[in-house]
Image (cartoon, grey):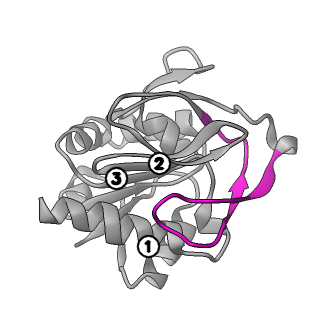
Amino acid sequence: MKIGVLALQGDVREHARSLSDCGVTASLVRRPSELEQVDALVIPGGESTTIAKLARTFAIFDEISARIKGGMPTYGSCAGMILLADNVLDAIEGQETFGGLDVTVRRNAFGRQVDSFESDLIFSGATQSPVRAIFIRAPWVEKVGLNVEILAEVSGHPVAVRQGSIFATSFHPELTGDNRIHRYFVDNVCQQAIAQ
């Protein structure tokens, strides 16, 4: 399986390194021709509106959206979660998402940059011991559709969700050195998509 990291803005190198630590050589994806060569995609944290605008500039926005809707395994962290959501609260006017994940997400739900924090989470079905999660201007999930599985919560708000081949976290596992979240994406989400 070839996994790409959307390399327009955000924590691109950190995600590529985490995937490498899981035994996966990640390809950087900026153009449609590069997207065609991968089987799965990671959408990093960063700034969701900037990533969407750059995806339009690089003429890859519609291709990503179509591949996600076609079942390509996709993982989005923080801004990536926002970009995967079908609905976004507190969005700026004209904000676009790739969509595909039947959730409503609230941008910057935990507050501004100064409100960033770390927390230990129980991640359902993937880890025995808690995962250290870093939240930076992070979203949370306000509402989930019927086929969305909640994998982790903070203060009653979902912060990790999965719907089939789409997986998203509102935190940044690529910044911790703990690769269990990326391992979950590779071993569970991607492998299950291959098996189907």
Q: Residue at x 21, y 45 (%)?
A: 67
* Marked residue nearer the N-terminal end (1 or 2): 2
* Marked residue nearer the N-terminal end (1 or 3): 3
Determine the CA span between mark 1 and mark 2: 13 Å
Q: Are marks 1 and 2 in contact (CB under 8 Å)?
A: no
* Magenta span includes 30: no
Instruction: Rate crowding at label 3 as few (under 14), some (14 to 19) or many (20 or more) other CA atoms within 10 Å.
Output: many
| Residue on which disc 2 sits | 168
Task: Report the front residue among 26 and 162.
Answer: 162
Specify the amino acid type for callout 1: Arg
Instruction: Rate crowding at label 1 as few (under 14), some (14 to 19) or many (20 or more) other CA atoms within 10 Å.
Output: some
Task: Report the front residue among 75 and 62.
Answer: 75
Q: Is residue 174 above or below residue 163?
A: below
Q: Are marks 3 and 2 in contact (CB under 8 Å)?
A: no
Residue 183, which numbered label?
1
Determine the CA span between mark 3 and mark 2: 8 Å
* Marked residue nearer the N-terminal end (3 or 2): 3
Q: Are marks 1 and 3 in contact (CB under 8 Å)?
A: no
Q: Is residue 121 visible?
A: yes
Specify the amino acid type for callout 2: Ala
Q: Quadrant of residue 179?
A: bottom right
